[in-house]
Amino acid sequence: SLLDLGEKSFVPDVYAIITRLDTEEGERLSKNFDEVMTLKREKKQQLIEVERLAAQKREAETRERIRQEQVRKRAEELRLIEVERLAAQKDAMVRELHCRFESDFLSADSYFQELHTGIITEQEFEAEKYSFVKNWISANIPSRNGSKQLPDDEQIAAIAAVHGDIQVVARAGSGKTTTLVNRTLFLLKHCRI
């Protein structure tokens, strides 16, 4: 039909010829043609608008993904900065504890309790204290028969217990006397009691 050819340039001329032959039919066809052309233009405009809106939506989604990725990266950077800051605080506190162990071992427990900030746990504090005592024993106790026999962890805990009395219970030959001698030497030489 002629309406399907609406985008061709000769169609208006055809309608003009039909109008000359039959005015009423020509006007009706011309009106239909104009309506169809208007509908096609509107449909084309709608498609263009839909494509424009879809492109805007894709653009907005892309910008949002980029923004979220930047937020995630920034949060990760801040988390790493916080981890590094806490690690630096922990290192500083461990160094301070070692200075305290060196200069005033007897007050180290109360110092830790006063300044306990959650940076170092009590188990970490005890491990640092035992490590210090073990190193002190290794450096300051003379060797026997050419070799040093270092105390085990339970013996170190007994040597490091400087507040109050301790009770050492173990089987024969397990090193009770050596532990008590080492504790006495540690208290006399290092803690100056």
Image (cartoon, rainbow, N blue to C red):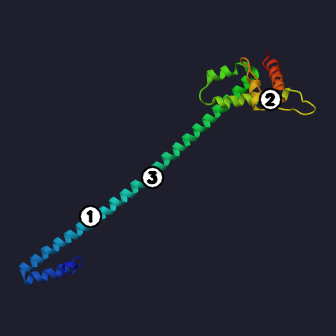
Along the polypeptide, which appears first: circle 1 or circle 3? Answer: 1
Along the polypeptide, which appears first: circle 2 or circle 1? Answer: 1
Q: CA distance from mark 1 to mark 3?
A: 28 Å
Q: CA distance from mark 2 to mark 1?
A: 94 Å
The C terminus is located in which quarter? top right
Lateral position of residue 68 relative to residue 38, left or right: right
Q: Which label sits on residue 46? A: 1
Residue plotted at (7% across, 82% down): 22
Q: Amino acid at mark 2?
A: Arg
Q: Secondary structure at mark 1?
A: helix
x and y percent of residue 76 in the render? Answer: 54, 44
Front position in the image: 43 or 156: 156
Question: Which residue is disc 3 drawn over?
Answer: 65
Q: Nearer the viewer, mark 2 or mark 1?
A: 2
x and y percent of residue 186 in the render? Answer: 80, 22
Q: Nearer the viewer, mark 2 or mark 3?
A: 2
Lateral position of residue 71 relative to residue 92, left or right: left
Front position in the image: 184 or 56: 184
Along the polypeptide, which appears first: circle 2 or circle 3? Answer: 3
Q: Amino acid at mark 3?
A: Arg
Number of residue marks: 3
Q: Secondary structure at mark 2?
A: loop
Whether tag 2 and tag 1 are in contact, CB under 8 A, the answer is no
Q: Nearer the viewer, mark 1 or mark 3?
A: 3
Lateral position of residue 74 relative to residue 155, left or right: left
How many residues crowd around disc 3 within 10 Å: few (fewer than 14), some, or many (20 or more)? few
Q: Which label sits on residue 171? A: 2
